[in-house]
Structures are given as C-alpha cells and as structure tokens.
Amino acid sequence: MRSPRHSQRTGLRVGLVGLGFGAEFVPIYLNHPDVESLTICDPDATVVAAVGNRYDVSSRSDDFEALLDMPDLDAIHLVTPIPLHAQHTLAVLRSGRHCACTVPMATSIADLEEIVTVQRASGLVYMMMETAVYTREFLYVRERLRGGAMGRIQFLRGAHYQDMERWPGYWMGLPPMHDATHAIAPLLALSGSRATRVHCLGSGRMRPQLQARYGNPYPIETAIFGLSTGDAALEVTRSLFDTARAYSERFDVLAERESFEWAQIDSGDQREGHVLFAMGAATDTRGRPVQMTRVEAPDRGASFPKPSGASRGWASTTRRGLTVPSSRAAATAARIRISCTNSSAASWRGDPHRSMRSRPRTGRQPALPPMTPRCAAAMRWTFRALPGPRSAPG
Ligand SMILES: NC(=O)c1ccc[n+]([C@@H]2O[C@H](COP(=O)([O-])OP(=O)(O)OC[C@H]3O[C@@H](n4cnc5c(N)ncnc54)[C@H](O)[C@@H]3O)[C@@H](O)[C@H]2O)c1
C-alpha cells in the first residue's frame, strides 16, 4: 500500500511495462505535461537497454515484481502479451497503483470479473487502452452524429482484419474474438450503448498446427450484438489467420440521413477515401437519390496537449524525411503534428520499433518513427481521467 506525497509533486510517476508496442509510449510520457517521471520495464534486458538508451531514460527495470516494489510510482501502464494482462493488472491494482492496460482487458469472464471487483474495492483507476476510439474517423463520425447530421443510427458494422503469421507464440490460433476490441469499441462508443446480447459464429478452418494451442479451428469469428440503447444492431467480424485480406480496423455507420463507410483500401498508394452517403429529398420516381462523396476525416493534431518544458528533447528524422528540431517543445509539437497526418490504422503495422532488437544502434539519437496519434491521444485521455493516487486495500 502506497500513498505518494502530493506536496512536492509535479505530476504522475509512471511505470511502463512491455517495450514492444509499448516503446511507442516512451516519448509521449517523457513529453507529457502531467508526467513527472517514467520508469521502463521489460524482462528482456537488451530491449530495456535499447529503449532506455534511445530515449535517455535512466529509471529502468527488467523485473516486473521489482517494479511493483518501487515506492515512487503512481500509475503503471501494461503493454505486455495478452495472456499476462489479467494477472499483471490485478498485481498493479493490488500494489495500490492506477493501472492502464493495452487491449484486451482479459480473455476469460472470470478474469474480467476479478479485475472489476478488485478495481472497485481499490478506488483506483483502471483503463483499457482502446486506441480505436481516438482515430480521426471515429472523431469525425462522432461529430456528425452529435451534430445531428446523420440522424438515427440504423445499423453498425465493424471489422478488424489482420494476419498474425510469425507473431509471438501466444497469438498462434488465438480465437479471433479474444482480441476484437478495435472493431467493437468504437461502435459501442458511437452508439452510446452497451452490448446486451450476442450471437457469434466461428467461420472457416485454420491449418491444423494453428488449432493446437487454443483448440480453436476458426480463423475468423463474426458476431451480432443487441445494444442497450437505440434500435440498431451491431455486427463485428475479426480475422487473424489464413485469410487474404489486408490489415484494416474499420467501421460503417448506417444512419437515417447520412451513412459513413470506411474505405475498403485504407493504406498505401491505392488508398481511397471513405464514403459519406447523404439521403436526398423524395422525387416522383421510386427510391430517393443518395449523394456519394469521398471524404477524409480531418486531422486533430491541434487539440493535443502542449508538451512539458521539463521533458527531454531529442532530434529525429521522420518517415517522411522531415528533420524534427531538437528543441524539446518544438520537437514534440512537430512530432505530434506529423504523426497525425499518418493513417491511424496503419500506424502500428511495420513500426520500426518492432525490429529494434535486430537493428544496430548507431548513436544515442538515431532516426525515430513518428508517434501514432492514437497513442498520444490515449495517453492524454488517461492522464486527464486519473484522479490523485489513493491507497489500495492490502
Ligand atoms: N493499438 C493497440 O491497441 C495495440 C497495438 C499493438 C499491440 N497491442 C497490444 O500490446 C501488447 C503487446 O504487443 P506487442 O506486439 O508489443 O507484443 P510482444 O509480445 O511483441 O512484446 C511484448 C513485450 O512484453 C515483454 N514481456 C514479456 N513477458 C513479460 C513479462 N512477464 N513482464 C513484462 N513484460 C513482458 C516482452 O519482452 C516484449 O518486449 C499486446 O497485448 C497487444 O495486444 C495493442
């Protein structure tokens, strides 16, 4: 049980665990105006050293248990492998720290219920770090819905297509609905609903070696949900294996006056715009005319928080070949602006951080990829939402 003293504090003291995808968050924390310090942790000491040296982070650990014993942490962000989410989350909450965990929250009902029970008893904040509710597309559609342009939602459809070939072992054969949050969450959020019932079907067959680990034969699962509010139904499809479909986190919202459909090809040179369908006035012919317009969801970079003046600066060359200045504030502002021009859905795929272990390091300030807007926005949301640290029950 820990009760950090507030009097001399300038911000939150954050622990970040799991430095694969988690490494993307390091510069965000270092520049976040509400963050006082960052400690990084991963059992792979080589990764800790590489990330720590890259971003000049001196507080490091290669032992999760030791991190939990550190007295000077307020919040711990878990970006660890899926099978560890539940046990790590419970350990963090029981240590008296706020907990943020990457998706999914857990993969069994028992684990989900235990996390809810422990979080409620602790009074601490838990956040599942759902990045799909910060995309430009999500914000665009939410704005149109809230402004009344779209009218009543009639149907929602989401999909997350991905090929997990050669990903870490715990992914191999994972039932697709164990990791479907990117498809479900934005649509529940847009409709302001909770799922009240569900029918789910497995579809297709994976090759036999993929079926062994989880006893799951399905490369794709598809589900239809009943919702707590409104009259619409929600349909979601998730694919992980043996299916020829390019990566996409996408959704369609069919509504009375306007409907939004996510571009079928949403990355690369062939990228096409999303489509906004607008219902026209009735004429004297059958059916009403529907106007179809290709649209781009606008950039929201200007709404990002101003970086902390106390944070570390670093210079870098972005994927687009722009040199980001080394001045701390300018570096972050430029980085965030640049990252917001990238497709959010494409941000994690092919991220150079993933191959960090095999890449030779050439100095303390090598070229860095831009941060994804989804990560930055998620962090901003988290720290606005966090109340002061409290003590957890023993
Ligand atoms: N947009 C998103 O929300 C998004 C994107 C990518 C990944 N993720 C999630 O992030 C998590 C990590 O993804 P990844 O691709 O980096 O996974 P990964 O398996 O490649 O890497 C996870 C990291 O955690 C470390 N790790 C392993 N065991 C650990 C332990 N016991 N304690 C602490 N750290 C441990 C590993 O050494 C590794 O560096 C996954 O749960 C994934 O679902 C979410």
Image (tube, rainbow, N blue to C red):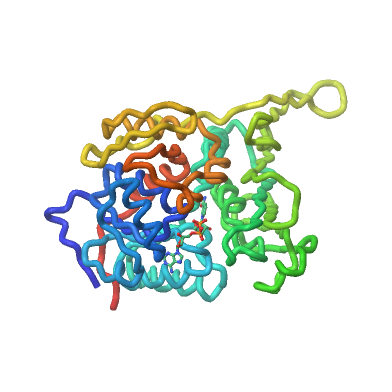
Residue 185 lies, with reference to residue 272, above or below; the image says below
Residue drawn at x 38%, y 69% as measured from the top left: 120
Residue 269 as seen in the image, left or right of residue 124: right
Q: Furthest residue to the top?
A: 284
Q: Nearer the viewer, residue 208 or 47?
A: 47
Residue drawn at x 35%, y 72% as measured from the top left: 121
Corner quadrant of residue 126: bottom left
Residue 13 as seen in the image, left or right of residue 76: left
Measured as percent of width and height from the top left, residue 182 is found at: 58, 51
Number of marks in picture: 0
Q: Is residue 303 visible?
A: no
Residue 138 lies, with reference to residue 271, above or below; the image says below
Quarter of the image with the N terminus in it:
bottom left
Q: Nearer the viewer, residue 197 or 86?
A: 86
Residue 323 lies, with reference to residue 219, above or below; the image says above
Corner quadrant of residue 296: top right
Q: Nearer the viewer, residue 69 or 288?
A: 69
Measured as percent of width and height from the top left, residue 295 is found at: 62, 27
Measured as percent of width and height from the top left, residue 311 is found at: 25, 42
Q: Furthest residue to the left?
A: 7
Residue 116 as seen in the image, left or right of residue 197: left
Q: Furthest residue to the bottom?
A: 394
Measured as percent of width and height from the top left, residue 222 is found at: 72, 58
Q: Is residue 94 visible?
A: yes
Residue drawn at x 62%, y 46% as measured from the top left: 249
Residue 5 lies, with reference to residue 259, above or below; the image says below
Residue 120 as seen in the image, left or right of residue 311: right
Corner quadrant of residue 33: top left
Residue drawn at x 28%, y 78% as measured from the top left: 394
Q: Furthest residue to the right?
A: 286
